[in-house]
Image (cartoon, grey):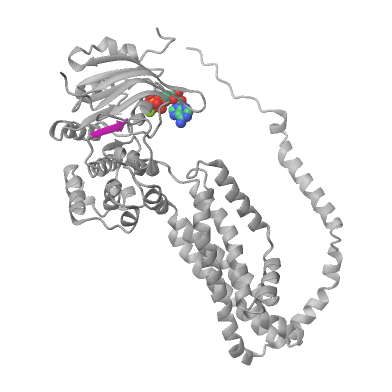
Amino acid sequence: MENSQKIPSRSFAQRWHIKPILGTVIMVILLVFSSQMADVNVGMFFANLSQFTDLLVRMSNPTWSYLSIIWQPLYETIQMAILGTTIGTIFAVPFSLLAASNLVHNGIIRNVIRIILDLVRTLPDLLLAAIFVAIFGIGSTAGVVTLAIFSFGMISKLFYEVIETIDMGPIEALESVGARKLTVIWYAVIPQILNQFISYFLYTLEINVRASTVLGYIGAGGIGVFLQRSLNEFNYGATAVIILATLIIVLVIDGISNHLRRILL
Amino acid sequence: MAEEPIILFEHVNKTYKNGTIGLKDINLSIPKGQFLVVVGLSGAGKSTLLRTINRMHGITDGKLYVDGDEISQYKGKALRTLRRQIGMIFQNFNLVNRSSVQKNVLSGRVGYYPAWKSILGLFSKSDRDKAVRSLRRVNMLEKLYARADELSGGQQQRVAIARTLMQDPKIILADEPIASLDPKTTKTVMDTLKSLNQEDEMTVIVNLHSVSLAREYADRIIGLRAGEVVYDQMIENVKEADLNQIYQTEEDS
Ligand SMILES: Nc1ncnc2c1ncn2[C@@H]1O[C@H](COP(=O)(O)OP(=O)(O)OP(=O)(O)O)[C@@H](O)[C@H]1O
Ligand SMILES: [Mg+2]
């Protein structure tokens, strides 16, 4: 038998790599255009570098005694992050189950849930924090609520995307033995996603530890409050200690969480 | 009068939502204790036929009786009670890979428990013993605490059969149970199904692609083509040529 198979010829676009080139050009145009719109002056960044070095010099003399004062707020920052992430996750689990297209076949429920989640995710966390500081007053309650809502939005989306990739076979098997919906989820869904869930929880926790230092800056409790105070008082020695201590804490937590996630996946 | 059939299809039609015809005017009476093999080309409707029996798929019209009850409108509790007396075995085993063999086997019993008890894993002593007996039956007891994904395909299918045994099923539906197995494990699995049929008097319905296996194990063979039953013979009347006919495509004939 004659073999008439040939290598197919590439189209014009494929041969000249039109798509990647076009994409790069559009990216560059958008970048230039948007920086002009937003009045970003790159030159100013370099012109003011001297001020930055000036600040560094003044911070180069950390007031180490300040450590004993910030110990407590640092601890509070971590607690805020853990509490906020946990509360957000607890709410995220049922929402992510309801938003997963392979578990909920009712398109209306699924879309309503997804719209709610999309809306939650569009709220900037600083705006949330400002609102909750106004409601609850300065302190960690505002921070925890902000982080909980932020984590809820983020984790729900990460979770339902994981759920949508699971193997449907075990679900079919559990349905075929006459299991109820909840039992099916417990036996056939949870074991498939648990590790990824924990990994995403830790990842969000990492982000929240970082975020909660910033949130404190606008009054939502934790180390940020002290950071803001020290800057206002031009107490740069204290600022340096706060920044260094925060950096170390964030690095340690990132390290632990990364290690755990590597073990899990 | 002949004994009442355990499964009875009367003018059953099934059209999928997208308009594909799954089953066309199926009339089929399956007596209790039969070993029925369903053959047919890919897409002929074998899986569809099997899945209507435990209502994993609903039917569009017609009547479908299991053990004398018309089941096509079953919902909720009635549906779950129907399903727990019908075991199902899959080509891909459908075990939960990350769970232990023991948990997988016990999951076959959850239809008999309220949700909170099965979630907390509060199985009775007798059901735990039953899991041990089921695994012993398929020669897999030594793997009780292994994770399902540590097992070979043939071992996984045996665990899946043990899970099905937990249901105390009257009927076993097996959808190409040996399609991903080697010849030796194929024999083990088919022999197990045969023994459930002969010793435990379960009615067994198996979809197969292999005509020779069908002839070796079946009491009766039916052939499907484009959703219709085109062949239906007891094993003593089955002729090789007829079976090959079922596997001929339009262009061949
Ligand atoms: N969920 C579904 N939605 C729409 N059409 C479907 C669905 N499942 C099956 N079909 C179609 O119904 C027909 C019968 O499919 P079925 O899976 O029952 O065939 P089969 O005989 O089991 O084939 P195979 O040997 O490949 O498993 C096919 O045309 C198939 O494409
Ligand atoms: Mg099939």
Foreground of the two, A141 or B5: B5
Q: Quadrant of residue A212?
A: bottom right
The image quarter containing residue B164 is top left
| Residue A108 pos. (x, y %) | 57, 43
- Location of the N terminus of chain B by quadrant is top left
In the picture, measured across the screen, residue B47 lies left or right of residue B68, that is right
Above-or-below relation of A12 to B139 = above
Q: Using the image, determine if residue B23 lies above or below residue B180.
A: above
The magenta-colored residue range is: B171-177
Across and down, in percent, residue B92 comes to 35, 38
**Magenta span main SS:** strand
Q: Residue at (23%, 43%) from the top-left corner?
A: B162
The reply to whether residue B155 is visible in this rendering is yes
Percent x, y for residue B32? 19, 27
Could you tell me which quadrant the C terminus of chain B lies in?
A: top left
Q: Quadrant of residue B37?
A: top left
Q: Quadrant of ligand 2?
A: top left
User: Could you say which is closer to the camera, residue A11 or residue A90?
Assistant: A90
Left or right of B220, for residue A41:
right
Tell me if residue B34 is in the magenta stretch.
no
- Residue positioned 30% across, 57% down in the render: B121
- Front residue of B114/B73: it is B73
User: Where in the figure is residue A154, as x and y percent of width and height?
Assistant: 59, 58
Q: Find the residue positioned furthest to the left.
A: B199
Q: Residue furthest bottom?
A: A65
Q: Is residue A232 found left or right of A41 in the rendered image?
A: left
Left of B147 or right of it: where is A29? right
Does the image show residue B93? no
Residue B172 inside the magenta-drawn segment:
yes
